[in-house]
Image (tube, helix red, strand yellow):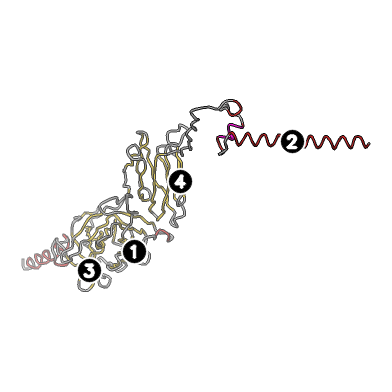
């Protein structure tokens, strides 16, 4: 019985470790427990995924780790991900020594990659401070540094670029607002990422009447005859013409802004345009052009476009000339002879014209008379 107190004491020490409640002394709440954290980083973990019992009897803990970077005494949130490790492995502690985690608050960039962290798994949430005026975030999947995280990163081999819009279209990456205790500036939380960099920036949609078209949006050309807008790559939307909805998508934008490809899913057809190019579309197959599609500006991965109902050029028309109220008779009648047309187009009176005709006749008679006499003399001489 004298060993009973020692056994009880041992159980009191071991049970918290098995349950995971004693790691770092923080209970089930937030606690510092991860070793080998990169410089200026703090890793906090919450037991929010529970403890699973493996088939082989090994207890495995899934910890949702929240990584912060300390800048000028402020712990800025960077990323959140899952660490999975065996609690009853003595001497085996989770390590973030091989993580890539970067944050530049002034440049509005953050990068995280857990690919080389053996105990990390799943997708990553990445955080970036909200900047007044910025309305878009570029996601640079596979970017492993700040230099490779920028608008246009898709031009780098191996990097996939995607633009998302907090409060609007975000595609496969949900965006929510996050407020961190002790930091006045709110953050954007971009979820479901892999090894990725993100960058916050401002998109000028062209101003004026131009707006951005979102996934599932509609442009009704039965209501307006033309519409200018901005479309992101791979956004599906419909254009209504003659009460029929046609599904459009800009399925490819050249990263060098050389051209873009537009696919009309309703018709299973596509066309390619460069900047300033116009495509005339016969949507209903009736043999006549129904709509024009123009790319005004290419700004990868955005396309600024204008669509309009086709308006054929009107041929010039001329009003018929009014005739005079009275018609002259005879040679100067309005029967359409040469004299009438001459009088209608020239400022010549009938008297002047008669005098000119008589003069011509007299000249002809003179030459006939003189010429006849000369011919007679020549005849006599021979």
Q: Is residue 296 above or below residue 311?
A: below
Q: Which residue is mark 4?
A: 278
For marks 1 and 3 on the same chain, the one whose residue lies earlier in the sequence:
3
Which residue is depicted at the point 35% across and 45% down?
227
The residue lying at 38 percent from left, 64 percent from top is 148
Highlighted magenta segment, given as a residue range: 339-343
User: Relative to 74, is 57 above or below?
Assistant: above
Circle nearer the N terminus (4, 3): 3
Residue sitting at the far left: 1
Residue under the point 41% across and 54% down:
298
Disc 4 crowd, CA 10 A, few/some/many (<14, 14-19, 20+):
some
> What element does badge 1 sit on?
loop
Q: Quadrant of residue 157?
A: bottom left
In the displayed structure image, the side of residue 341 where residue 88 appears, left or right: left
Element type at marker 4? strand
Mark positioned earlier in the residue sequence (1 or 4): 1
Circle nearer the N terminus (2, 1): 1
The label nearer to you, 2 versus 1, is 2
Asked if the residue at tag 4 contacts the one at tag 2, i.e. Cβ–Cβ closer than 8 Å, the answer is no
Specify few, some or many for label 3: CA neighbours under 10 Å numbering under 14, 14-19, or 20 or more. many
Structural distance between the alpha carbons of marks 2 and 1: 113 Å
Task: Quadrant for residue 329, please give it.
Answer: top right
Nearer mark to the viewer, of 1 and 3: 3
Q: Are marks 2 and 3 in contact (CB under 8 Å)?
A: no
Tag 2 near tag 1, CB within 8 Å: no
**Is residue 352 magenta-colored?**
no
């Amino acid at each position: 019985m004298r060993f009973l107190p020692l056994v009880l004491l041992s159980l009191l020490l071991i049970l918290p470790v098995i349950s995971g409640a004693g790691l770092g002394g923080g209970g089930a709440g937030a606690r510092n427990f991860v070793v080998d954290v990169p410089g200026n980083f703090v890793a906090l973990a919450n037991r929010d995924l529970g403890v699973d019992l493996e088939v082989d009897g090994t207890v495995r803990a899934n910890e949702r780790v929240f990584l912060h970077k300390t800048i000028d005494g402020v712990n800025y949130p960077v990323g959140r991900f899952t660490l999975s490790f065996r609690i009853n492995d003595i001497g085996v502690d989770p390590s973030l020594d091989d993580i890539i985690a970067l944050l530049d608050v002034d440049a509005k960039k953050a990068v995280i990659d857990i690919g080389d962290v053996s105990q990390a798994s799943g997708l990553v949430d990445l955080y970036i401070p909200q900047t007044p005026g910025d309305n878009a975030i570029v996601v640079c999947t596979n970017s492993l540094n700040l230099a490779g995280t920028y608008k246009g990163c898709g031009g780098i081999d191996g990097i996939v670029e995607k633009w998302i819009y907090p409060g609007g279209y975000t595609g496969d990456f949900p965006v929510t607002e996050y407020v961190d205790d002790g930091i006045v500036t709110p953050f954007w939380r971009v979820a479901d990422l892999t090894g990725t960099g993100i960058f916050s920036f401002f998109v000028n949609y062209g101003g004026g009447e131009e707006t951005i078209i979102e996934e599932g949006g509609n442009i009704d050309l039965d209501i307006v005859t033309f519409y200018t807008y901005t479309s992101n790559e791979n956004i599906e939307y419909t254009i209504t013409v003659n009460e029929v909805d046609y599904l459009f998508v800009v399925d490819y934008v050249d990263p060098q802004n050389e051209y873009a490809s537009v696919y009309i899913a309703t018709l299973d057809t596509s066309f390619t345009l460069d900047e300033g190019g116009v495509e005339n579309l016969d949507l209903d197959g009736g043999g006549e052009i129904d709509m024009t599609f123009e790319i005004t500006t290419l700004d990868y991965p955005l396309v600024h476009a204008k669509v309009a109902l086709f308006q054929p050029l009107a041929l010039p028309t001329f009003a018929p000339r009014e005739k005079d109220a009275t018609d002259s008779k005879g040679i100067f009648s309005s029967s359409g002879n040469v004299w009438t047309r001459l009088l209608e187009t020239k400022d010549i009176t009938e008297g002047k014209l008669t005098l000119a005709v008589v003069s011509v006749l007299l000249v002809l008679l003179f030459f006939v008379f003189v010429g006849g006499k000369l011919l007679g003399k020549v005849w006599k001489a021979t």
